[in-house]
Image (cartoon, rainbow, N blue to C red):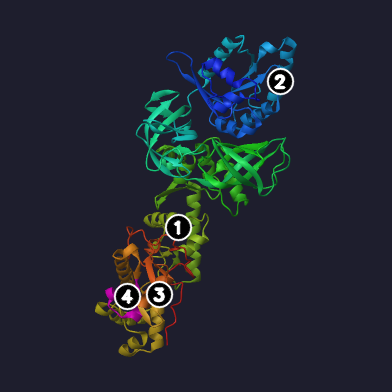
Amino acid sequence: MIIGTAGHIDHGKTALVQALTGIDTDRLKEEKARGITIELGFAYLATRPDGPVIGFVDVPGHERFVHTMLAGAGGIDAALLVVAADDGVKPQTLEHLAILDLLGIARGLVVLSKADLADAPRRAAVTGEIRAALAGTGLGAAPVLPVSVRSGEGMPALRAALECLAAETGARAAGGAFRLAVDRCFTLAGAGTVVTGTVLSGAVATGQAVVVSPRGLPARVRSIHAQNRPAERGVAGQRCALNLAGEGIGRDAIASGDMVLDPALHAPTDRIDARLRLLGSAPKPVGTWFPARLHHASAEAGVRLVPLGEAVQPGGQGLVQLVLDRPIAAAVGDRFVLRDVSAQHTIGGGRFLDLRAPARRRQVPERLAQLEALAASNPGEALARLLATPPGLVELTGFARDHALAEGEEAALAAAEDPVILEAGGLRHALSRSGWEGLARDLAATLARFHEETPDQQGLGRERLRLLLTPRLPGPAFLAALTRLTREGALVLEGAFVRLPGHAVRLDPADEALFARILPRLGGAARFRPPRVRDLAGDLDVPETEVRRLLKACARLGRVDQVAHDHFFDRRTTAEMVAIAQDVARGAPDGVFTAAAFRDRMDNGRKVAIQILDFFDRHGVTLRRGDLRRMNPHRADLFGDQALGRDSLPVGRPDFKSGWGSEAVPGGFDSHSLPPAPEAP
């Protein structure tokens, strides 16, 4: 069990911890000289020789060091509120008590210290003040124990109460991924870098790989001290010292406020949606872009608040978005405290609800309903509520990370709800059964309307269809949904087109006969440089307008592609050319190739090669920057899965430094949504 002290300056917190443990937590020279606590102090008390160890976090009581008190209060199990009998309840007593309440600390003891300096009436009066201050807080029922460190009065009763509190404190949930909030970092001769802090969730073992977040420094745990004892493992609820090793790991690289965590959890955030409770003592309501200082675990950051609704009034509650001035490592459900920008007053606090808050549409009803679902007391309930809240879609990989779930816990939660799982791009999206059935019905109805309105079209473009449906799935998840429905026979997926199984566009017999004469001329050795429309018309002795009409109809059917105004290619040839371009990119430095390199492989002349590459550019198959191109694997199946396949090289992905992949693809998203570029005269 970890107990945090709280109370006004010079009320005897440090002396009380020393009397209990024999350890003076004021270790700094300045603390000795001034007789006050400045930095966090730590001490330990073994309840029995082989029993559990109680850890004490001794915090400063001076108003200038409340930020340090907040760093120590994060992660404690219970509070030891100290009020001097001769002084009574003071401003820092009330502020510390408010902070404990905002952090959800509902277990603890109140010590009426310096009891030898007060007679019975004085003790009764101060006890009444304490009871009035405790009313309405989580510590409202905490016992008040008169204690004197000098005379020893009440010390046995206090030890007994602490042991009873420790016995009643069950071990924290063993689940969850490992997180430790760093409050100190120092170097030990012969050991190296050591960080100390409270394990907020999960467990850590010697030899384990971890990450120091938010900087993202990888490290390895060389050794562990848990509750001031050498150990092979540290678990949630313990104070641990971790000896870390790794490139870049050092005292100057790690600071109070960092988080040592399981590598899977490293995803810092600077925009968080939360539920805020504003203290009645707050000087004014929280309106848009309200400035404050945010305290979370041992971290502190500047923040601006945006109410997700009406302004939050003093003494009231509401949903807000927190926009931080720097990223922090956090988890959904973590508690936070807000102080004013002058760092003189605590104004409120609450719980994090969503670490990936949107910058736009943050107040629409659907979004607010999702936040109410995320406000559930545990991840299982939150997942169930999210699946029942429109759009009923949950990205499970991110959900598990942001809730600090251990490996396997996410799968267990998902199995309990029995959703439809769509796996794509290394992510797992869960969709409620009712949501899936509604999506399938909506998709079928949308395709049926399209076929009725445009019976001569092969099908509806995949991306256009995605944008028409609710819920609007992410691209990879939507492709997984289409693939699943295709396996079930509900639809047919043909490259970039989607159609119902019963829909078919056929040419009349005369057109089929003419196309049968044209197709051989588009293949063979000359397939990469097929005849122009006027040449085909001359060879076949058919009017050019008829040939052009037929080839345009075949393009809508996906049999051919109009690469340029007068050039039509067999769809199989288009797929082959995409594969050739991919092979050229694979052999080029960094996957970037020139038109000349592609032309040399095609052996069809510069003009036709440029027309082909321009065609690829228009449809996003290639991404162009100046005279250079690279492949876009996200459009790999635009002309059929045989073009690039599922294992194409990871080039062409958005790169915010170079700008590659950030350009928008103009026009529609299916392979026939753009007109060909006009032919040069």
Q: Is residue 63 located in the magenta-colored stretch of the structure?
A: no
Q: Tag on residue 614?
A: 3
Question: Which of disc 1 and disc 3 is earlier in sequence?
Answer: 1
Q: Is residue 283 left or right of residue 15?
A: right
Q: Residue at x 46, y 18 (%)?
A: 52
User: Of discs 1 and 4, which sits in the foreground?
Assistant: 4
Expressed as whole percent of the image width and height from the top left, the position of residue 583 reads 29, 66
Q: Which residues are magenta?
A: 594-608
Q: Amino acid at mark 3?
A: Asp
Badge 4 is on which residue?
Answer: 596
| Image-quadrant location for residue 155 | top right
Question: SS of the residue at dot 1?
Answer: helix
Q: What x and y, as percent, mark residue 467?
A: 51, 61
- Report helix, strand or loop for mark 3: helix
Q: Amino acid at mark 4?
A: Ala
Q: Tell me which corner region of the image, top left, top right, bottom left or bottom right, holds residue 229.
A: top left
| Closest to the observer, 561 or 602 | 602
Q: Residue beneath label 2, please?
A: 88
